[in-house]
């Protein structure tokens, strides 16, 4: 989506993108930083704790 409409981020400095746990990629996060956006998502630690509790 950001590659298709590059102005989406450029027109909104400091854009905060809220995502679920499936958007957990350093490559994706680095791409957002390069575009001037920030990603807010659940931490990896919470995911590991939830998986451990399910066992």
Image (tube, rainbow, N blue to C red):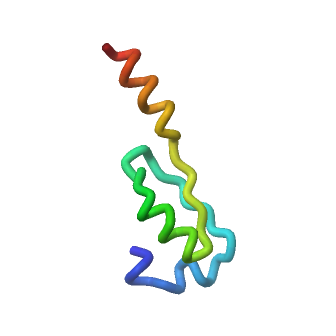
In the depicted structure, whether residue 52 falls above or below residue 1: above
Q: Quadrant of residue 51?
A: top left
Outermost residue, left direction? 55
Q: Position of residue 47 (x, y in %)?
A: 43, 32
Q: Residue at x 44, y 76 (%)?
A: 2
Image quadrant holding the C terminus, namely top left
Image quadrant holding the N terminus, namely bottom left
In the depicted structure, whether residue 6 falls above or below residue 39: below
In the depicted structure, whether residue 22 falls above or below residue 17: above
**Apparent side of residue 48 relative to residue 37 in the rendered image (left or right):** left
Q: Position of residue 40 (x, y in %)?
A: 57, 52
**Apparent side of residue 23 relative to residue 40 in the rendered image (left or right):** left
Q: Residue at x 38, y 19 (%)?
A: 52
Outermost residue, right direction? 14
Q: Position of residue 43 (x, y in %)?
A: 52, 40
Q: Position of residue 12 (x, y in %)?
A: 64, 77
In the depicted structure, whether residue 48 falls above or below residue 41: above
Numbered-mark total: 0
Q: Residue at x 42, y 24 (%)?
A: 50
């Amino acid at each position: 989506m950001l590659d298709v409409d590059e102005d989406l981020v450029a027109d909104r400095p400091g854009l905060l993108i809220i995502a679920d746990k499936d958007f957990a990629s350093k490559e994706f996060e680095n791409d957002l930083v390069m575009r001037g956006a920030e990603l807010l998502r659940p931490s990896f630690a919470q995911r590991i704790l939830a998986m451990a509790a399910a066992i």
